[in-house]
Image (spheres, rainbow, N blue to C red):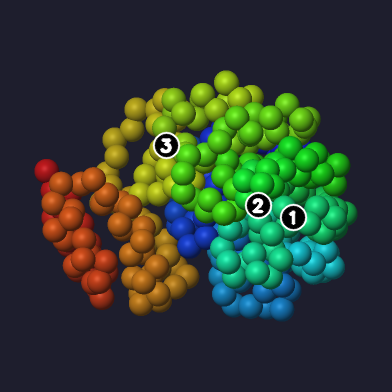
């Protein structure tokens, strides 16, 4: 399938997740057949003013393609300036976050707060479309809260503003990540627009992914937490018979990060990933604390090898 002029490898794509979709994890997902990867959300203003933290989120491995960069902003002129400067020229798709539920983002009128401000949201999208030749996509939620379920109207606005595709997370902002995702509303969005719609929320396996596409008409599915600790989920969804070597995958995750970050930063960052990689493994509970508090890569690799020893 295509998003404007960008061909996706498969309809199973990786949802952006702040703190998780680092360059190494995205590379692994792409290796296992992910149709499209997306960065963690990056501040457009941070990029414009040369923030090292924002720029670090743009690290990317050669095998990660096609790939989208997700920016967040509520200032059309900032989006314009970032795109005109060419900072994001190496990415295939420009994705705009209008669904982040985190208080510090919402408080500033960004992320899911934009679902309550359609004129500003439209202006941001139009600014991206007018200042880039790349496809512009938007990720958002069902609405801000249960009294403001406006995903259908928001989707129409995105389409009218020039978006080439949208991704809908089946929860409201106030739900955060709790409760069950509502796929019915996502289906209503599909019926309301002509651009591709990707469904997101509670996708843990191929059966669920295909059900979302077949029953609700989604062009594809965005896998988020279902991929954590399991980047090979995309191969499973493609029906490939794979021999998973978890220790080697974990070590590869670390080795890619070592190209860009210090060991200290990597150890801090990888604690949350490690918790997912070892989830459900026998004996994992007994060594979890030691694993996530280790101050040495050598020690972590030794623990991992022992944990997964057959």
Marks 1,3: beta carbons within 8 A: no
Q: Residue at x 57, y 54 (%)?
A: 174
With 254 as the anchor, is 293 left or right in this view? left
Distance Cα–Cα, label 1 vs label 2: 7 Å
Percent of width and height locating residue 116:
74, 55
Ranked by sequence position, the earlier of labels 2 and 3 is 2
Disc 2: CA contacts within 10 A as few (<14), some (14-19) or many (>=20): many
Please state the horizontal and vertical placement of residue 21, each as a whole percent of the image. 50, 56
Distance from the alpha carbon under mark 2 to that under mark 3: 25 Å
Residue appearing at x 49%, y 50% in the figure: 177
Res. 76 in view: yes
Q: Position of residue 179 (x, y in %)?
A: 46, 44
Badge 2 marks a residue whose secondary structure is loop
**Left or right of residue 58: residue 32:** left
- The residue under label 1 is 116
In the image, what residue occupies the spot 63% across and 50% down?
145
Q: Nearer the viewer, mark 2 or mark 3?
A: 2
Where is the C terminus found, in terms of image quarters?
A: top left
């Amino acid at each position: 399938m295509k998003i404007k002029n960008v061909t996706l490898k498969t309809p199973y794509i990786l949802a952006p997740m702040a703190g998780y979709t680092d360059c190494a994890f995205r590379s692994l997902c792409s290796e296992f057949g992910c149709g499209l990867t997306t960065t963690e959300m990056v501040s457009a203003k941070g990029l414009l003013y040369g923030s090292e933290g924002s720029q670090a989120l743009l690290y990317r491995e050669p095998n990660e393609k096609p790939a989208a960069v997700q920016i967040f902003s509520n200032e059309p002129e900032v989006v314009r300036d970032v795109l005109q400067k060419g900072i994001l020229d190496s990415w295939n798709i420009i994705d705009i976050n209008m669904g982040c539920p985190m208080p510090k983002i919402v408080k500033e009128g960004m992320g899911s707060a934009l679902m309550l401000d359609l004129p500003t949201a439209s202006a941001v999208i139009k600014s991206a479309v007018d200042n880039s030749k790349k496809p512009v996509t938007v990720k958002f939620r069902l609405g801000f809260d249960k009294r403001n379920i406006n995903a259908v109207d928001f989707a129409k606005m995105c389409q009218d503003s020039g978006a080439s595709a949208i991704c809908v997370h089946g929860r409201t902002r106030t739900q955060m990540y709790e409760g069950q995702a509502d796929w019915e509303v996502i289906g209503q969005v599909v019926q309301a627009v002509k651009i591709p719609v990707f469904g997101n929320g509670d996708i843990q396996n191929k059966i669920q992914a295909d059900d979302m596409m077949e029953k609700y008409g989604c062009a594809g599915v965005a896998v988020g937490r279902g991929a954590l600790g399991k980047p090979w989920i995309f191969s499973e969804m493609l029906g490939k018979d794979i021999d998973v070597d978890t220790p080697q995958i974990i070590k590869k995750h670390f080795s890619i990060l070592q190209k860009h970050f210090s060991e200290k930063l990597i150890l801090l960052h990888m604690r949350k990933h490690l918790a997912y990689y070892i989830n459900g493994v026998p004996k994992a509970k007994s060594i979890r604390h030691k694993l996530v508090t280790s101050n040495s890569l050598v020690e972590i690799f030794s623990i991992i090898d022992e944990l997964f020893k057959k």
